[in-house]
Amino acid sequence: MRMQIGAFLARRLSEAGVRHLFGVPGDFNLSFLEQIQDADGIEFVGNCNELNAAYAADGYSRTLGLAAFVTTFGVGDLAAIGGIAGAYAENVPVVHITGAPPLHAIHSGALVHHTLVDGDYDNVGRCMAEFTVAQARITPANAAFEIDRVLRACWLERRPVHLQLPSDVTHIFVEVPDVPLVMTDPSSDPEQLRVAVQRIVDALNAAQAPVLVVDADADRFGVTDLVQKLSEKCGIPCASLMPAKGALNETSPRYLGIYAGAASAGPVRDAIENADCVIGVGLRFTDSSTGLFSQRIGRDTFIDLRRHDLSIGAVQMPGVMLRDLLARIVEGAKPVARPAAIDSPVVASNVERDPSQADEALTHATLWPRVRGFLRPGDVIIGEAGTAHAALVSLSLPAAASYIAAPTWGAVGYALPALFGSLTAAPSRRHLLFIGDGSFQFTVQELSSILRRDQKPVIFLLNNGGYTIERLILGARSAYNDVDDWRYAELPRVFNRRDNTLSFVVQTVGELEAALTQAETADRLVFIELVLPAMDAPALLKQFAGRLADFDYGERGPRNPPPAVAQVSGSAGSAREYNHVVDESA
């Protein structure tokens, strides 16, 4: 069949499950956006800037499975590149489409706007190639093949891809396949699969204290259901690394909690580090997920299941697909009755409310137990890197709740546009955002997009006057960690002329209780500004910040000046004062 190239791309996106295309219009992508308007099953959703569009696509993908956004060449691409790199680091499948200058300008090296006016039209593509798993410049000769190849690579690797669509080819008719695009994972080598299943089942049957540990790839590759079935059938305790928070059912009696090496709760650490068979699903041992590489998992007892291969101890086995393997293990494993896992004390301590008074100033100790009581089954909870994320990973989530964060990339400002993307993907689910004031100021414009589409999240703004996570690392009283104190609770009305939001400024426990009570039944966007002390933080963050500072700056860094320097240096005095502050708060 014959189709216009842009219409074919829109059709393929729709067949891949993309219902919304985020982005920012520019003169090189307008012809494609006209085709999107005419396409069935896909809608353009504008963003305030290209970085926000990339973050929104990331949040959309985590909730729905695949996402796409569009920018204009050069200036738009480079504005979005931080979000694309974040999706690469976090293993999130996002299709980036850029409206490129016309082919005749590319071929002649014309010095056009939005380029570096040096005639080089490959430089942007070289930048994008660093943060994507497939790239292509679409032409009439390659459109039918390259569009399918790049989209399949996005799904296969669960990472971003980059398509350049020159402005003068979007309406060219070409021959295209008449069959739908089917996104399927490759099949396993039958003999490799059989051998791998037998070895793993044998190891499980022989184990007295096995354990399952999952990372974010378990969610990205859609195998958490199989992990749960294996856990229940064989009575195996299971835990998550921090990036997989919310991937497993945290109400299950088999769920241990978050494993983060030395930063783990005692029962979680004991169960994993003393196990005689550890089955890992998509594990990546990063600094933030292991308490700075403090994990202790024995190599001989470790079965490492990855997306397209695995290892059992030192034996590597390629050609075995993750879902194939887990499905066969669930089928072949022998049912075993084991006692329920011991609840993590981190989880238990955050469920009980402390006996604080209504007029008591709000702190993290009084805030998060009440937040836990506010959560409902099925909620989508989004935590910004830093204070909010450190607290949320220590809370047990209700059944069917989802958690979105970017702890590996750790980009400040990610969470608000990611909220917009996830809300667009699943408007019927209640969304809760927890974001710090410094992060909010990065991408605050996207609040207007949320209001424009009449979305109704509950937004918790943690106002502690700046970057508390950085203060805990270094510069407790340094001006570089301060941010201006906006009137945050008034911003929903600033960004939207309709009076259809509910805002609160909360400084005490009683005010928090009243705000949460009204938020429970409000059929509108709710914005709750939480005024917190600058140096107050969840215990997990205090613990990690000190270890991170030593990791970053070493034992002779500014936190720990040598005695000779401390006697003569004013900055060293500040460092000693900083350490005193942290020691007291810890």
Image: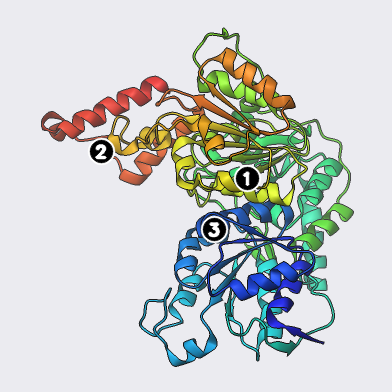
Please determine whether, in this image, residue 353 is positioned above or below residue 237: above
Q: Amino acid at mark 1?
A: Ile
Point out the tag, 2 or 3, that comes first from the N-terminus.
Answer: 3
**Position of residue 288 in the picture relative to residue 155 (left or right):** left
Q: Earlier in the sequence, mark 2 or mark 1?
A: 1
**Quadrant of the rendered image containing residue 496:** top right
Q: Nearer the viewer, mark 3 or mark 1?
A: 1
Image depth: mark 2 or mark 1 in front: 1
Q: Amino acid at mark 3?
A: Ala
Tag 3 secondary structure: helix
What residue sits 19% from the left and 35% below the top? 562
| Residue that numbered label 1 is attached to | 450
Q: x%, y% of residue 468? A: 41, 33
- Vertical position of residue 290 compared to residue 564: above or below: below
**Mark 3 to mark 1: distance in Å?**
26 Å
Q: Are marks 2 and 3 in contact (CB under 8 Å)?
A: no
Q: Could you say whether the residue bearing mark 2 is in a helix, strand or loop?
A: loop
Name which residue lies at 55% across and 48% down. Answer: 446
User: Residue beneath label 3, please?
Assistant: 89
For residue 69, above or below residue 576: below
- Which residue is at 45% across, 46% downward? 442
- How many labels, in total? 3
Residue 306: give x, y in percent of width and height: 67, 60
Residue 40: give x, y in percent of width and height: 79, 67
Spatial separation of the CA atoms under disc 2 and disc 1: 42 Å
* Residue at numbered disc 2: 558
